[in-house]
Image (cartoon, coloured by chain):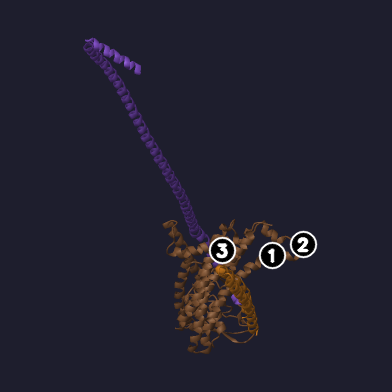
Chain colours: A brown, B orange, C purple
Amino acid sequence: MVFILLLKKVSIPLRQILKAFFQNEITMRLFNKFNTLVLTVFSVLSINALYAGHDEVDGYVEKDFNIGEMIMHHIKDAHEIHLWGDAHNGTSVYLPIILMDGGLKTFSSSHLYHGELKTAVDHKTHEEIHYVAGVGPADGYAIFHEKIYKLENGELQFEDSHPHNAKPMDFSITKNVFVLFLVSFIVCLLAIGTARYYKKNGAIAPKGVAKFIEPLVIFVRDDVAKANIGEHAYKKYVPYLLTIFFFILVGNLLGLVPMLSANLTGNITITLFLAVCTLLATVLSGNKNYWHHIFATPGVPVPLLIIMIPIEVVGILTKPFALMIRLFANITAGHVIILAFIGIIFINKNAAWGALSVPMALFISVLEILVAFLQAYLFAMLSALFIGAAVEEHHH
Amino acid sequence: MTGTVAAIGAGLAVLGAGLGIGRIGGSAMDAIARQPEASGKIQTAMIIAAALIEGVALFGVVVGFLGL
Amino acid sequence: MDLITPDLGLLFWTGLVFIALLFILTKFAWKPILNMVNTREQKITEALELAEKTKAEMQLLAAQNEELVKEARKERDAMIKDAKATADKMVDDAKNKAKEEAEKVLESARTSINAEKAAAIAELKAQMAAFSIEIAEKVVRENLSSDEKQKALADKLAGEINLN
């Protein structure tokens, strides 16, 4: 009962905000359907989180529940997709590991996760630390906090709780890489499906998948690209902005899917890459006017330019940097809050707390759907804004 | 220790962001009350401004992460 | 700290996948979609323009029709007026002519009557004269058969002349 009430209460303002955002009834209807779907499956996520209290790599030793560790484990990349069950008796999809270490080495991550239990003594704190060393094809490697290390004399050397062993070049298909493929596949499916619909039916009113994609495409073209870049130059950047918008949107939404529980767009590497793309797009399309404003800001006396030029140059970098941090922090923070609410149950070791924490987590989850759209829009819009500043025509 | 200090820092950052977003929300309400017909545009602008402030607050949170 | 350290392997895969995605989508999805959307928008704009144009044309046609009807009405009115005038004139003419004719006939009748009358009178006169002479001759012959009668007549005639 509480769930339904909360769902209704949250859905209405959310609907209005999203409506203001997309001003499109069709998207809203789809959103509503999607909303309900996500809400129903979210209870499953809670169950998923239940069993994740223990860190797999910490070995078979029972440890006190550490909420920070649990959260960090969940928002970080992994070499497996943990589906359900206790860490070592549970069900996981083990992903392939690809190492560049004097030649290409590939093996399943199960050889790393289910290897030989070892204990090492920290060189500084003299604490005992448990870890698992790989067996079979993974011999000579160990995984600790989802990072792969080369063993020295068959051991990990710890200092301040961190291994100091050398790391091989890791090109593994990790959980994030897998989700990256999945996101690309879904985006391709949606976009190419729409394109094929038009190819088959000609330029008519959209139906099916095209009905969902087309308003978003037009939204990005008109309200993001045209509004921020300007009529004269926006056409060239629409494909880039569309790709970035849909990539982030689908990535954000997949991050909310339980079991998969990927944190793709909440991964600094992904956002770094996207931000670099925007930086390159900005810098490479900067016209004379743009560079003139940076290196000889009009109306600024020459002595001041000594201060102004470094500030402006740093400004080129801080804008995409802010983009990178914004997306990363927003998505990660959302995941952290949801996990923290679920964690309340385990801190108190009482299922009754679920009555409080699960609705709260549900509320944040619904909010995260809004954030998913919002952040995709913001990333695309700010990218367009920066590009727009770079291609702006001189009018003084 | 660093974790605690980072948590306090993150809290302060959130405080500032809360004030900022609160001001935006309040001003947006005023604006909508004055011009209900422009509510769509005001809402969009409000959300963008709120997201930008939130971005700054999240810088603080990221610094908090650094301490973890 | 781990959380905000970029991972080389993931960066490699991201770059690969994202750039591939950008190219594939641009070529096979965004361009066709945007083209179609543009085409459709153009079509809609054209259709709207056409509708507007047709509407204007219709209005023009309606106005023209009205003008035509007005003109036709005017023409009709003029025609009726003309016809009426002609008819009136014809009636008048006919009347006049008939009158004239009648008068003519009357005149000729009168003339002929007069002539006949004159002729009749003349004949009557002539006959009367002849009769008178005959009578007179007879009378004279009778009356003058005796002298007294001749004398009485002469007296009478003389008396008449005196009266005149």
Q: Nearer the viewer, mark 1 or mark 3?
A: 3
Q: Have a look at marks 1 and 3 and say if they share a chain.
A: yes
Judging by the rendered image, the residue that carries numbered circle 1 is A313
Q: Quadrant of the C terminus of chain A?
A: bottom right
Closer to the camera, B48 or A309?
B48
Specify whether residue A218 is in view.
yes
Give whichever of C50, C29 is nearer the camera: C50
Q: Label 2: which residue?
A: A301
Q: Position of residue C113 (x, y in %)?
A: 30, 24
Label 2 packing within 10 angstroms: few (<14), some (14-19), many (20+) = few
Above or below residue A345? Residue A242 is above
The residue under the point 29% across, 22% down is C117
Q: Who is closer to the viewer here, A41 or A182?
A: A41
Cα separation, mark 1 vs mark 3, equals 25 Å
Is label 2 in a helix, a strand or a loop?
loop
Point out which mark residue A224 bears.
3
Displayed quadrant of residue A99: bottom right
Chain at numbered mark 1: A
- Mark drawn on residue C20: none
Task: Return the residue found at the far right.
Answer: A303
Query: Three-letter amino acid code at disc 1?
Result: Val
